[in-house]
Image (spheres, helix red, strand yellow):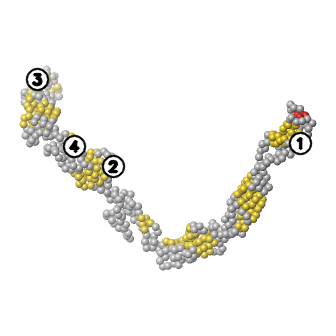
Amino acid sequence: MDFADVKQSCSARSLAEATDVHYIWASPLMWRVYAVYNSVKGSCSEPVGFTTHSCAPECPFPPKPSHRTKNSLTLQWKAPVDNGSKITSYLLEWDEGKRNNGFRECYFGSQKHYKVTKLCPAMGYTFRLAAQNDVGTSGFSQEVVCYTSGNIPQTPSAPRLVRAGVTWITLQWNKAEGCAPEEVITYILEIQEEDNDSVFHPKYTGEDRTCTVKNLKRSTQYKFRLIVSNVEGKSSPSDILVCTTSPDRPGPPTRPVVKGPITSHGFSVKWDPPEDNGGSEILNYLLEISEGNSEADQWECSESLLVRTLSVAPGQCQPPRVLGKPKHKEVQLQWDAPPVSETSCHISAYSVEMTGPEEAVSEVYHGPDLECTITNLLPGRTYCFRVKALNDGGYGPYSEATEVTTAAGPPGQCEAPCLTFLSNTSVLVSWESPESFGADISEYRLEWGEDEESLELVYNGTSNSFEIGQLSASAHYFCRLQAINQAGAGPYSDLVTCRAPASAPDAVTVLYVSDDEHLDACPLSPSVCLALNWEEPCNNGSEIISYNIDLGDITIPVGNVTSYIIDDLLPETTFR
């Protein structure tokens, strides 16, 4: 410490205040002194020791309940700092449960615990504690409220709905029954948010008896229940309250579009529902029509659609007429424009409709011209044609129908003829009549041959079958058929191929007896055996499997060989 004056004494208190030194009561301290002059520091003196005086204890911490029943409370506490003098006793005061800030002595003694008896169940009592030593008494601790044991709250009634918004629900509930007025009651509001989630989750915990649950989904059902708790525990959950949040305003529908044709005096429009229905079924739509802009402050309007009504549709056309003669596959039609009225406008197109032989209806022309050529028709068939005109007002009515019969044409392609073998050397060729296309078939032409490149005409006539004979065994043949009428010849049928059946082989034409020199390998004498040889004949389409050798009245079967030795014969004998 640096003293600028020449004082040669000071008190410990003033020194402590000057140096911000804190002393412990009844503690030994050491002092020494040195002088300073003009920043020159002198030597320190010898240290001197002394001991501070004791004082009253520090304020103790509040007592804590260690055990409680319905009629008693056991409190305990810890000793505070004694400040140099041993604590001799404690003073415990209470308000006797009156809550009027008036305290009476409850216990005075040296123990650090005390059991208060003859109390009321489920009631709060306020306590405070002071410590005393030989010097004095400390200040009182902070007040603490301790409760005796009681009963858990009764099951509460279900919460009540006050109001439901789009994303929030306000609920309220009655005060818990069977609880003391001074008892601290906590309410727990639980919510079940999803139908597939059977678990309730706490949404509010507090002492208020109303709550607004926020951040909910619109037009969604929620389930709520209430639980009451006190120091003894929680009650059973209340009955479930089911609430539904309100729907929101729907979003704008899609832009209207024209549905169907626009007529001269009206039109139909359609639209899709809004992507966002606000969480509820759409009840009504408001369709506005105006020549200018319209305002609807309570509706989410879609984009506007500009529609112009059409002119009056054209009148009925006269039936179309044929130009020239109908051909067998096409016909050329021509028609006049319908009469023009004051309310009709320019005709933009014509549509020609054709009804075919099988009552098949199709549009065969669409365009601005007053004539057209219809192709790909069938010869010799009757068709009906009618025409209608188109302008901005739509199509006019169809004209009366015009019947047109196409010219006859060559017959259609014959189906492949059917071949039926009557024997190994003859076949019956038969066929079905093809489409005649307006003219009777006057002739069939059947071509036949073993080479598909050089077929010969083997039949022409009106019959539907023909027999061909003198076929070679196992030979390949080709044939095709063509029909003819007065309009010409139709296309050939698909080429048909067949193979004649196999037959018995031809007779052996070359048969001879080998010379004696060829019998040298035979172990028998040439006088009792014959060596026969022959050439293989034509097998007529089937492999030869055996031969029969006739020796007089005896038949000798042999396999597929061209030589055979006959033994055990009589010498000097002639055989055939």
Whichever of labels 4 and 3 marks the residue nearer the N terminus, that label is 3
**Which residue has dot 1 on it?**
576
Question: Residue 287, position in %: x, y?
Answer: 37, 66
Single out the mark in the foreground, 2 or 1. 1
Q: Position of residue 325 (x, y in %)?
A: 66, 74
Compared across the picture, whether 4 is left or right of 359 comes to left
The answer to whether residue 435 is seen in the rendering is: yes
Residue 21 % position (x, y): 15, 30
For label 4, the residue is: 235
Position of the C terminus by quadrant: top right
Residue ID at (49%, 74%)? 313
How many C-alpha atoms fall within 10 Å of the one at disc 2: few (<14), some, or many (≥20)? few
Camera-near label (4 vs 1) is: 1
Mark toward the start of the polypeptide (2 vs 3): 3
Left or right of 12, for residue 188: right
What's the residue at 13%, 39% (across, down)? 121
- Quickly name the residue at label 3: 50
From what the image shows, is residue 20 above or below residue 394?
Answer: above
Whether pointer 4 and pointer 3 mark residues with C-beta atoms closer than 8 Å, the reply is no
Whole-number angstrom distance, CA of label 4 to CA of label 1: 133 Å
The residue tagged 2 is 195
